[in-house]
Image (cartoon, grey):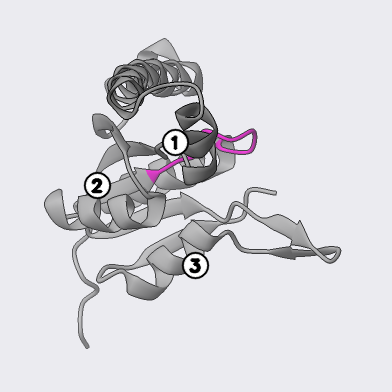
Amino acid sequence: MTSLPKISTILYATDLGKNTRPVFKQAIAQARAHNASIIMMHVVEPMGETARAVIAAYMPEMEIEGMEQKEMKNVIHQMKERLKSFYDEECEEHEKDLLPVKNIHVIPGSPSEEILTAAEKFKADMIVMGQSTRKILGSKVMGSSARRVARLSRVPVLIVPNM
């Protein structure tokens, strides 16, 4: 009989949406079941081309790049604080030492690409993320980041319904 692969590091990717708590609770449950640590992660998407084009009508390109870099640093800092607050809210004071959260990371980029890169960088044995559904023609469909990560990941991906 073959044994199951060892899971020692879990990458928990969150969009910090309104239904994030069940996904985090599942990451904690998996970490406790496998005696694993959790790396919390949030990806901040950069300004889109449409927004950039609108701003370009009013500002020179160099100013836009400087403003974008400054604002991205500010957003990353704010999101890291939100993740820390979320973590604090989710655990009772006596639980904090028992919770397996090792690191909190907030980075800019494309969510699916950055999640896959982080899984390799941190040698994650599992990725836990929310389904992030949306409605198309009245039916709920899985979000594009969850689909892409599940399709391209080299490690198991647990996609938790967060509707």
Q: Which residue is mark 2?
A: 35
Task: State yes or no: discs 2 and 3 in contact (Cβ < 8 Å).
Answer: no
Q: Nearer the viewer, residue 162 or 116?
A: 116
Q: Callout 3 environment at 10 Å: few (<14), some (14 to 19), or many (20+)?
A: some
Vertical placement of 136 versus 124: above or below? below
**Percent from the top left, x then y, of residue 143?**
58, 59
Q: Earlier in the sequence, mark 1 or mark 2?
A: 2
In front: 130, or 28? 130
Q: Which mark is residue 83?
A: none
Residue at (62%, 55%) from the top-left corner? Answer: 161
Tell me if residue 98 can be seen: no
Q: Is residue 37 above or below residue 86?
A: below
Q: Nearer the viewer, mark 1 or mark 3?
A: 1
Q: Earlier in the sequence, mark 1 or mark 3?
A: 1
Which residue sits furthest bottom?
1
Residue linked to disc 1: 47
Q: Which residues are magenta?
A: 13-20
Q: Amino acid at mark 2?
A: Asn
Q: CA distance from mark 2 to mark 3?
A: 27 Å
Q: Horizontal placement of 21 versus 30: left or right?
A: right
The residue type indicated by label 1 comes to Met
Q: Quadrant of residue 19?
A: top right
Judging by the rendered image, the residue that carries numbered circle 3 is: 147
